Amino acid sequence: MSVPFIDFKEQNSLIQPEIDAGFKKVFEKGDYILGEQAHLFESAFSKYCEAQYGVGVNSGTDALHLAMAALDIGDGDEVIVPTHTFIATALCVSFCRAKPVFVDIEPDTYNIDPKAIEKAITKKTKAIIPVHIYGQPANMDEIIAIARKHGIKIVEDAAQAHGSRYKGKRVGSLGDVACFSFYPTKSLGACGDAGMIVTSDKAVYDKALMLRDYGRKGRYEHKIKGTNSRLDTLQAVVLNAKLKHLDEWNAMRAKNAAYYAELLKPLSGVVTPITKSDRTHVFQTYAIRLSNRDQVVESLKAKGIGALIHYPIPLHLQEAYADLGYKAGDFPVAEKTANEILSLPMFPHMNKEQVEMVVKALKESL
Ligand SMILES: *Cc1c(COP(=O)(O)O)cnc(C)c1O
């Protein structure tokens, strides 16, 4: 008996009729590019995030890239990024010819460490990109205080945290701009690539609208140099259907996480995720820590349990960033985390037996 890393069959069958009807309507209407469903999703999702505006784009990576551009980040600027994240968090900075400045993370939440941010700030720092890693918001009060003190912007990388809350407020409303990915495996996922920039800043919104549409305002006038990165109307049909279920599905993930925690508690050497009392965790990823992680991953795979590593190489040690001159030992917390972290299967419709099977296999693998 095997347990996949994720399995969306059940959630897909729930929304299948709505998607069939929605696709048919789009084909009949022919509004493929920035059609009605895309606009509906922009307003529904930004409202869900308790923010004023949403700009649908091609991917989470594009959302980050265009957010940087909308904030005028460019040549000579520095942007502070946690080293423990997906590489897109830093690529967006490089694409704008600015420099990502990596910093360490907190050992308990794996989120960016505010104390490390303060130390990394220079005259060139223009922004901080906190990543709400695995689904739990970063320590925003401290990050906001630092950003205000130094007059720098906050771009939330919320690609893993659709719907989670910090002190009651939704992720997406906590910084100057927030970027979401709707990559199929995210907790709100399309049937392909999709992403969104969410903001309550009208100037950022207006610029992001132009940036994703060849820099134009109206049909023939091009105000700035933009690109082509627009949320597909067909993807928006899928996302509109799923958004209605997101809170319920997040609650199901949290219930599975609680059951994992209960079963894993007696196992020595397994560190389970913690949730800070002032925020919620939506568990897009259920990540535990183990000292003999590499052996355990192989053993779990052999037993048919889907397990992945998010992420085995911190960004400062990636070949793509060799030019920045970082070395092993620069960020000890992130490096230790990269060696020990392990993501177990997690999806809303995962049942109790599946959680039990994963824990049983893990016990044997230890
Ligand atoms: C998935 C992800 C992205 C990139 O999103 P894409 O839609 O795949 O481009 C960026 N940042 C984080 C933290 C992610 O998990």
Image: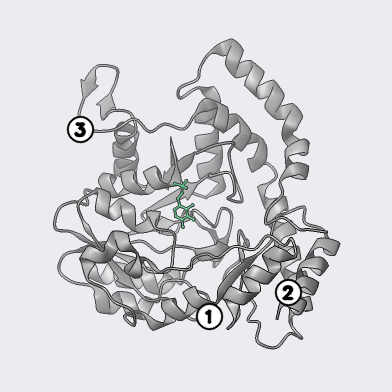
Seen at 15% across and 68% down, the residue is: 123
In space, the residues marked 3 and 2 are separated at their CA atoms by 54 Å
> Viewer-nearest of labels 3 and 2?
2
From this viewpoint, which residue is outermost toward the top?
28
Which callout, 3 or 2, points at the residue further toward the start of the chain?
3
> Viewer-nearest of labels 1 and 2?
2
The residue tagged with tag 3: helix, strand or loop?
A: loop
Spot occupied by residue 311 in the image (x, y as percentages of width and height): 49, 66
Q: Amino acid at mark 1?
A: Asp
Tell me whether circle 1 and circle 2 mark residues in contact (CB < 8 Å). no
Question: Which sits in the foreground, 5 or 241?
Answer: 5
In this picture, is 37 found above or below 275?
above
Q: Amino acid at mark 3?
A: Ile
Name the quadrant containing residue 129.
Answer: bottom left
Q: Amino acid at mark 2?
A: Leu
In this picture, is 2 found above or below 239?
below
Seen at 31% across and 69% down, the residue is: 102
Quarter of the image with the C terminus in it: bottom right
Q: How many marks?
A: 3
Please give the residue where the numbered disc 1 appears in the rendered image. Answer: 108
Seen at 26% across and 30% down, the residue is: 215
Spot occupied by residue 330 in the image (x, y as percentages of width and height): 31, 80
Spot occupied by residue 294 in the image (x, y as percentages of width and height): 57, 74
In space, the residues marked 1 and 2 are separated at their CA atoms by 22 Å
Spot occupied by residue 16 in the image (x, y as percentages of width and height): 74, 31
